[in-house]
Image: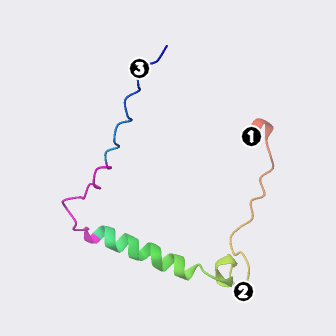
């Protein structure tokens, strides 16, 4: 008893090329936002990024209200 031969596996098709956007122009607002974000990241690098107060410490009033029942 012989079994019929199995057909060869299908040849895989190559993936489609990546879709390119037709509008490659970036708005000025997007550029400015990206630039500001990059500048902020540069400024926050190093020891100065961990200092949250000035040399005199915190200058605002302390919160002195006590806790209430169930967070009210």
> Above or below — where is 39 with respect to 22?
below
* Badge 2 element: loop
**Distance (Cα) linking label 2 and label 1:** 34 Å
Q: Residue furthest left?
A: 22
* Badge 1 element: helix
**Which numbered marker is on residue 55?**
2
Q: Is residue 1 left or right of residue 70?
A: left
- Number of numbered callouts drawn: 3
Magenta residue span: 14-28
Q: Residue at x 32, y 67 (%)?
A: 30
Which residue lies under the disc numbered 3? Answer: 4
Dot placed on the residue nearer the N-terminal end, 2 or 1? 2
> Above or below — where is 4 with respect to 63?
above
Majority secondary structure of the magenta segment? loop
- Please identify the quarter of the rendering in which residue 8 is found: top left
Instruction: State which mark lies toward you, 1 or 3.
Output: 3
Which residue lies under the disc numbered 1? Answer: 71
**Which numbered marker is on residue 54?**
none
Along the line of sight, which residue is nearer the eye, 17 or 51?
Answer: 17
**Distance (Cα) linking label 1 and label 3:** 76 Å
Dot placed on the residue nearer the N-terminal end, 3 or 2? 3
Binning the other alpha carbons within 10 Å of mark 1 as few (below 14), some (14 to 19) or many (20 upward) gives: few
């Amino acid at each position: 008893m012989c079994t019929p031969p199995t057909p060869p596996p299908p040849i895989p098709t190559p993936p489609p090329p990546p879709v390119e956007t037709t509008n490659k122009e970036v708005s000025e607002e997007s550029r400015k936002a990206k630039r500001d974000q990059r500048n902020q990241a540069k400024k926050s690098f190093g020891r100065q990024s961990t200092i949250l107060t000035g040399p005199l410490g915190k200058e605002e009033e302390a919160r002195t209200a006590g806790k209430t029942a169930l967070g009210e």
